[in-house]
Image: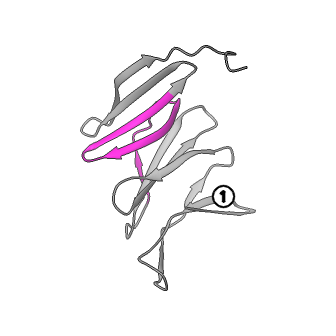
Amino acid sequence: LLAMADAAGTSLVAAWTTGVGAAWTVSPPLALAPSAALRSTGPAGAGAVYVLIGRADGRTALETIANGAGAWRQLADPPNDTAAIAFSSGRIDAVSVDSTRFSDAVLNIATGSWVTSQSIEVPIQFGSSG
């Protein structure tokens, strides 16, 4: 994943290669709003990547692209406090942390909505490390 910045703003592109000396395939650019913040990025299945983008209005955007795909694909906005996304066979999870609460939401592809799968309190004794 590469960031390109100029006077017009910042865009992200994904790049893939099949090996040493092989040509690179580069995705179309994904333009970011001036106030957007890249929260996380990672694998989104075989030959695909995701980007999680924080918007100025507090909402979070999720975009994916696969090697050879013609365009970035925007998925349903995950919960606003999402820190990372996990893609597995037939499932997409949004992981979030708020102080001592860990939450996991699963994307219902059919409805485009996120459903809380698990939420737990993690007992942390703040200030106990020294």
Furthest-right residue in this view = 7
Residue at the spot of label 1: 10
Furthest-bottom residue in this view = 21
Disc 1 secondary structure class? strand
Q: Position of residue 4 (x, y in %)?
A: 65, 64
In this picture, residue 129 sits left or right of residue 72: right
Residue 94: in magenta span = yes
Q: Name which residue lies at 44% across and 35% down.
A: 78
Q: Position of residue 51 (x, y in %)?
A: 50, 50
**Colour scheme employed for the rendering of this structure:** one colour
Q: Name which residue lies at 33% across and 33% down.
A: 106
Q: Is residue 33 above or below residue 9?
A: above
Amino acid at circle 1: Thr
Residue toward you, 112 or 95: 95
Q: Name which residue lies at 41% across and 77% down.
A: 18
Residue 114: in magenta span = no
Q: Position of residue 3 (x, y in %)?
A: 63, 61
Q: Is residue 128 above or below residue 86?
A: above
* Quarter residue 119 falls in: top left
In this picture, residue 90 sits left or right of residue 104: left
Q: Main secondary structure of the magenta part?
A: strand
**Rendered-image quadrant of the N terminus:** bottom right
Q: Name which residue lies at 73% across and 20% down.
A: 130
In this picture, residue 49 sits left or right of residue 127: left
* Quarter residue 126 falls in: top right
Magenta residues? 72-96
Crowding at dot 1, Cα within 10 Å, few <14 / some 14-19 / many 20+, comes out as some
In this picture, residue 109 sits left or right of residue 12: left
Q: Is residue 2 above or below residue 44?
A: below
Tally of marks: 1
Residue toward you, 70 or 40: 40
Q: Position of residue 105 (x, y in %)?
A: 37, 29
